[in-house]
Amino acid sequence: MVVCKHVKYSGRVQGVGFRYTCQGLAAAFAVGGYVRNLPDGEVELWVEGEADQVQTFLEAISRRMAGYVERCSVTDEPAQGFKGFSIRH
């Protein structure tokens, strides 16, 4: 089943390679979406794919970036039809 998650990370998440880490990790999973910095200092991530792929991808981000993330909010969203995973500016 395809799921879509909208995630916001806060803490020391900008200027630490967060977006590039997400992009690199995404290459190992069958997911689509994007990651970008927000003006308020948070990082926004949209990801969709099969539920197990999305969950494992988000867990990989949590493990890799644990030292930088203070809070993380995850919202279920309708599928967006993302193709590939990118960094948006």
Image (cartoon, helix red, strand yellow):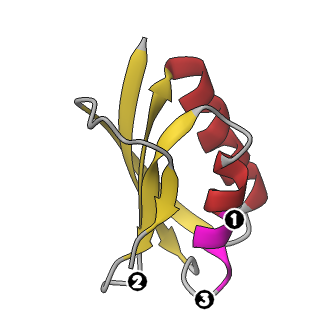
Q: Main secondary structure of the magenta part?
A: helix
**How far, Cα to Cα, is label 1 from label 2?**
17 Å
* Other-residue count near label 1 (Cα within 10 Å), few / some / many at <14 / 14–19 / ≥20: some
**What's the mark number on residue 15?**
3
Instruction: Name above or below for residue 11 compared with residue 53.
Output: below
Q: Residues within 10 Å of mark 2 (few under 14, many from 20)?
A: some
Dot in front, 3 or 2: 3
Reply yes or no: does residue 76 show up in magenta.
no
Of the residues shown, which amino acid type is indicated by label 2? Answer: Gly
**Which callout, 3 or 1, points at the residue further toward the start of the chain?**
3
Residue kind at label 3, given as amino acid type: Gly
Distance (Cα) linking label 3 and label 2: 10 Å
**Residue at (67, 83) in percent of width and height:** 16
What's the residue type where badge 1 is placed?
Thr
- Callout 1: SS: helix
- Residue on which the image places disc 2: 41
Range of magenta residues: 16-21
Report if the CB atoms under discs 3 and 1 are less than 8 Å apart.
Answer: no
Residue 77 screen position, x and y as percent: 25, 34
Q: Earlier in the sequence, mark 1 or mark 2?
A: 1
